[in-house]
Amino acid sequence: MSSIPIAKPMLGVEEAEAAYNTILTGWVTQGPRVQEFEEKFAAYCGAPYAVAVSNCTTALHLSMIVAGIGAGDEVICPSMSYIATANSILYVGATPVFAEVNPVTYNLDVADVAKRITPKTKAVLLVHQIGMPADIDAFSTFCKQHNLILIEDAACAAGSSYKGRKIGSHSDLVCFSFHPRKVITTGDGGMITTSKVEFYERLKLLRQHGMSVNDRVRHESGKLIFEDHIAVGYNYRMTDIQAAVGIQQLARLDDIVSERRKIANYYHEAFADIDCIRLPKEADGYFSNYQSYSIYLLPNAPLTRNELMQHLLDDGINSRRGIMTSHRETAYVDLGFDTVNLPVSEHAADNSIILPLFVPMPQADIEKVVSAVRKHLGYA
């Protein structure tokens, strides 16, 4: 039996040709295509600057560094997020302080965050979970009131909007992912948008070993130039091959989001009468790219989340558990985070399921998913 995947990147001839043509130029590491991708991504988001990096985790790491976060500091973030969110805080010697999420959006609850501030709190790491925008205005106001730095983890949110503006244009540091599970992909890769020129210059320096002059500038110069390494940096560069693919993907982004939203709306309508599940909900002014479609099983559901997932797998339909809670992962238990009490996050994680959604998704596959979910929940 052929199975329906949980996700699949939308890559075509245009991306293949872009990669091929870039390879033929002989410039395959960070170079002119990376700069072009950065400029086009910044323009798309409405941000002054964008810096391409190797993935979103390195984007978060560099953002922590340029924001001045280090040993002894605390950063409030959700536990209900992919583990890279919290890991980026540990990378700089700071401590992640886990806060609760809203049970409908899975995004940070500002009221709960307020309870977790201490004299050591330096920043809030706000996640736009599975593409659903968080309440940026509420957190921006909150951070200004408490003299905190706001960093956005927008790994899943390329193409999403908040109050009429694209994610990436609201805060000083916003980090994106181009992993194959995301709405657009470069194979792997990441991007940081920023409104501060000092952050922009520092990010570019740190991503390439702290070199005073990058390879492209040195190559294009008609004068002899020797680089100096003026900071301890990292090899977090994106390749020109990846960027060439990213440029093509970016040109498709709005169309991809439009198609994803059509599928999400089909799911909305098909599941609207099922009283034992909760569906995703967009508030006024929130526009999701539906990077994933997650349903939540209410207490009156006739089976458990894991039982439903197994039934779907038996039907040839792949699904995924709800978003993890990092504090319950072995690495964090071993670090002593097992004492963290987050009942809302844990309940949401343990009772939610992510259904297949990708572009193009055959109508027959969409209908098969709908039929199977309805059957196993007693709504055949």
Image: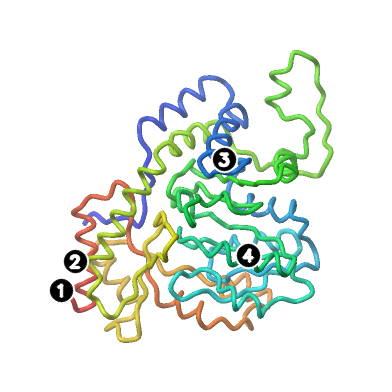
Query: How far is the residue under mark 1 from the one under mark 4?
Result: 41 Å
Question: In screen coordinates, is 132 left or right of 115?
Answer: left
Residue 245 location, x and y as percent?
47, 34
User: Which tag, 1 or 2, sits closer to the chain's start?
Assistant: 2
Query: How far is the residue under mark 2 from the one under mark 3?
Result: 41 Å
Query: How far is the residue under mark 4 from the one under mark 3?
Result: 26 Å
Question: In screen coordinates, is 253 left or right of 176?
Answer: left
Q: Residues within 10 Å of mark 1 (few under 14, many from 20)?
A: few
Q: Dot 3 corresponds to which residue?
A: 42
Q: In the image shown, does 191 or 124 lie closer to the viewer?
A: 124
User: Which tag, 1 or 4, sits closer to the chain's start?
Assistant: 4
Residue 186 location, x and y as percent?
49, 41
Q: Quadrant of residue 305?
A: bottom left
> Which of pointers 1 and 3 indicates the residue nearer the eye?
3
Is disc 2 placed on a helix, strand or loop?
Answer: helix
Amino acid on which the number 2 mark rests in the picture: Ser
The N terminus, quarter of image: bottom left
Query: How far is the residue under mark 4 from the one under mark 2?
Result: 37 Å
Q: Is residue 287 above or below residue 273?
A: above
Q: Residue 371, which numbered label?
A: 2
Q: Quadrant of residue 91?
A: bottom right
The total of numbered circles placed on residues is 4
Q: Residues within 10 Å of mark 2 (few under 14, many from 20)?
A: some
User: Which tag, 1 or 3, sits closer to the chain's start?
Assistant: 3
